[in-house]
Amino acid sequence: MSVKQQWTLGLGLALIVIMGIFPPWSSSWWFYVGQPRIYSAPTSYAFIATPPAPPTPAQIGLTDPDTPIKPYCKIALDWSRLTAQWLVVLALIIGGMVWFAEPKSRAILQ
């Protein structure tokens, strides 16, 4: 393995670890306004041990004072975004490993 491949692998794996330490989060609101409704939206990135604060009802548009609502909010890891990020970095790692391969190794791959 060449030095460039080692750097590519090391940087890619470091990026994957950092993405796992500061993952994307999503918030889901359940509330009842005439009928049950669900509002889900991606939120910010935050440290894994301290999730972001949920948005207020006003931030998601629940500001009608005549409508009695009792919203419930859940903050969770956004696994679909995190998985997509990891797959993109993995594809870049594989591409970098092939790009920086020695000519002999590249001939085997073709």
Image (cartoon, grey):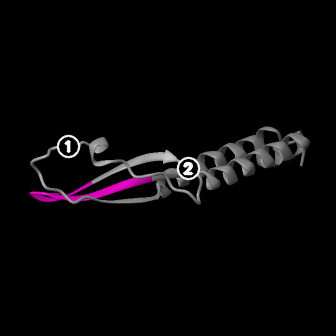
Mark positioned earlier in the residue sequence (1 or 2):
2
For residue 87, side relative to residue 107 (left or right) = left
Q: What kind of secondary structure does the magenta stretch mostly adopt?
A: strand
Image location of residue 21, percent across then percent down = 64, 55
The residue nearer to you, when weighing 95 against 14, is 14
Bin the neighbour count of mark 2 within 10 Å (Cα to Cα): few under 14, some 14-19, many 20 and up. Answer: some
> Pointer 1 and pointer 2: residues touching (CB < 8 Å)?
no
Q: Could you say whether the residue bearing mark 2 is in a helix, strand or loop? A: loop
The residue nearer to you, when weighing 67 against 42, is 67
What is the total number of numbered labels drawn onto the structure image?
Answer: 2
- Identify residue for label 2: 46
| Residue appearing at x 73%, y 47% in the figure | 12
Which kind of residue does numbered mark 1 sit on?
A: Thr
- Identify residue for label 1: 63
Q: Which residues are magenta?
A: 26-38
Image location of residue 102, percent across then percent down = 88, 41
Cα gap from disc 1 to disc 2, whole angstroms: 27 Å
Which kind of residue does numbered mark 2 sit on?
A: Ala
Image location of residue 28, percent across then percent down = 34, 56
| Residue appearing at x 59%, y 60% in the figure | 49
